[in-house]
Image: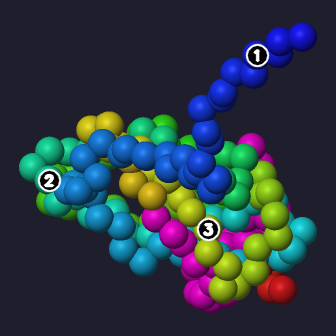
Amino acid sequence: MDVLLKQRPNILPGFIVIAAVSVAAANHHAVVIHDPWIQEAPPSAEVLAAYMVLKNTSDETLTVTSASSPAFERMEIHKSEIHEGMARMVHVENLAIPQHGQVEFKPGGYHFMLMGRKQPLRAGDKVDLTLTFSNRTELVTTAEVRKNMGHGAMDHSKHSMEQPMKQSVMEDAQTQ
Ligand SMILES: [Cu+2]
């Protein structure tokens, strides 16, 4: 009985597929990120805050249209403000960075709210953050988890958007 064995094309051992990831305009980012960091929170906290400075080096106003992190379910831009003695947060949908200007994210002001933490994070850990801008560029930065820097810092673990808390309550909450 004749058995025809078709010769299969050889698959080279150790063949590696290299995924080419292309990011638009990767070589000249209009926005530069300075000093990205995440404030360390108690291990039970599922919500953390990230801070950085976003510098727009271009000649046009650029808007942060979305943000994400593989370490969290969701990432939003919030602004903390004191309103009639109460600290509250406002969700900012599209944050504009003026041409040749900058926006500083810092405790007590703008912050990236990181929600739905997927794994425990401690000081020294590194977390990737991806920002998407209105010029369709994407910027990935690595933020280091740092201890509470003290003055003006807030613990995001116990607040909610709907229930503004008194500043004093928030300051109490940051003791670990
Ligand atoms: Cu917030």
Residue drawn at point x = 86 percent, y = 74 percent: 43
The magenta region covers 141-170
Residue 99 image position (x, y, % from top left): 16, 52
- The answer to if 158 sits in the magenta stretch is yes
Residue drawn at point x = 62 percent, y = 88 percent: 150
Residue drawn at point x = 62 percent, y = 42 percent: 11
Question: Which residue is situated farthest in the top direction here?
Answer: 1
Which amino acid type corresponds to the residue marked 1 in the rendered image? Leu
Cα distance in 3D space between marks 3 and 2: 27 Å
Write down the residue under mark 1: 4
Q: Is residue 169 left or right of residue 79?
A: right
Please tell me how crowded label 1 is: few (under 14), some (14-19), or many (20+) other residues with Cα within 10 Å.
Answer: few
- Upstream in sequence: badge 1 or badge 3: 1
- The answer to if 76 sits in the magenta stretch is no
| Disc 2: residue Cβ within 8 A of ligand 1's nearest atom | no
Q: Relative to the observer, which residue lies in front, 21 or 83? A: 21
Q: Relative to the observer, which residue lies in front, 82 or 46? A: 46
